[in-house]
Image (tube, helix red, strand yellow):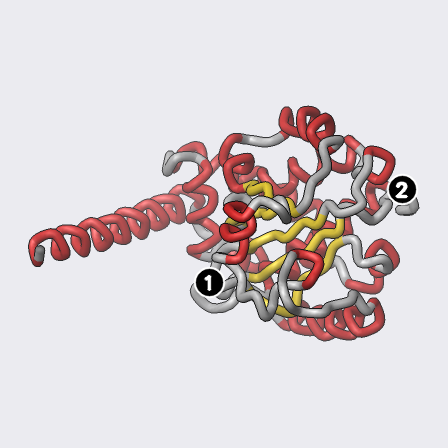
């Protein structure tokens, strides 16, 4: 028994050493960084690029260089809440005030809220990028990933996210925030969503698809899986939990304005 425990410990230690070695190898391949690129390329960030490329340093380097070029042009860290607040007025997507059981940042999405009233696809993409940056900014120490809770109650094809918006958001998530998503719970999706899913699956890689978990309120196994990730006292009622939560745009705006100051200082 003791040999088994020791072997398990050696495997974990060996895995950690291998991960650290690959991260150092990627750092060396990228070369010296400065300014915002240096701030961005944390060990957790680099691990994500390696993970999605099956720890191939050459492929991870190419992907990371593409991201650094994108960040230099798009400047996601410079987006401020007052620039995107209008897209968030109805609480379509926001950072939750609670974490999952592992201490990860949680983003809540209300897919049943009509999205057609957005001013433009570009503005909504900018809003989504802002929230991704904000989620990363609020990672707790030791955490490099986030969890998503997506409520499909009331969803219909007429309320669905435009295909172009879906495609661009998925592309940005997979190409520039690799492995930042730990798991996504799709709560109460209707049958009509299956047709929409068949379309957007063409834009999703297998690793992202595997992170999507469907949860049906009357299916105990899927509900139990979701609750194994969240404290029921924190989980909102609309996701089968006990917390009574309502999106307050003014209160959330104050929180995001404070985060903007933290982001600027960082």
Residue 68 visible in the shown view: no
Q: Classify 104 as above or below 204.
A: below
Binning the other alpha carbons within 10 Å of mark 2 as few (below 14), some (14 to 19) or many (20 upward) gives few
Determine whether, in the image, residue 79 is placed left or right of residue 230: right
Please name the residue shown 39% across and 42% down the image.
29
Helix, strand or loop for disc 1 = loop
Quarter that holds the N terminus: bottom left
* Mark carried by residue 102: 1
* Mark carried by residue 116: 2
Q: Classify 7 as above or below 169.
A: below
Determine whether, in the image, residue 20 is placed left or right of residue 221: left
**Disc 2 or 1, which lies upstream in sequence?**
1
Helix, strand or loop for disc 2 = loop
Observer-nearest residue: 141 or 3?
Answer: 3
Residue 70 visible in the shown view: yes
The image shows residue 46 at horizontal and vertical percentages of 45, 49
Q: Classify 151 as above or below 253.
A: above
């Amino acid at each position: 028994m003791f040999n088994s425990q020791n072997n398990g410990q050696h495997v974990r230690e060996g895995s950690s050493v291998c991960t650290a070695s690959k991260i150092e190898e990627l750092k060396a391949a990228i070369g010296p960084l400065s300014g915002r690129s240096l701030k961005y390329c944390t060990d957790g960030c680099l691990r994500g690029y390696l993970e999605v490329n099956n720890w191939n340093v050459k492929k991870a380097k190419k992907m990371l260089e593409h991201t650094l070029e994108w960040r230099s042009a798009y400047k996601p860290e410079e987006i401020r809440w007052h620039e995107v607040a209008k897209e968030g007025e109805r609480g379509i997507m926001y950072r939750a005030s609670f974490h999952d059981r592992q201490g990860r940042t949680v983003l809540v999405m209300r897919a049943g809220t009509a999205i057609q009233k957005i001013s433009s696809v570009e503005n909504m993409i900018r809003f989504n990028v802002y929230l991704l940056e904000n989620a990363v900014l609020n990672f707790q120490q030791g955490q490099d990933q986030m969890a998503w809770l997506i409520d499909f109650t009331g969803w219909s094809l007429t309320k669905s996210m435009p295909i172009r918006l879906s495609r661009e958001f998925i592309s940005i998530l997979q190409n520039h925030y690799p492995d930042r998503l730990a798991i996504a719970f799709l709560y109460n999706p209707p049958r009509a969503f299956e047709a929409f899913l068949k379309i957007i699956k063409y834009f999703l890689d297998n690793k992202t698809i595997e992170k999507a978990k469907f949860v049906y309120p009357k299916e105990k196994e899927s509900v139990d899986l979701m609750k194994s990730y969240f404290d029921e006292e924190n989980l909102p009622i609309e996701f089968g939990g006990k917390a009574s939560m309502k999106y307050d745009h003014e209160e959330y705006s104050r929180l995001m304005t404070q985060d903007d100051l933290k982001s600027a200082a960082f």
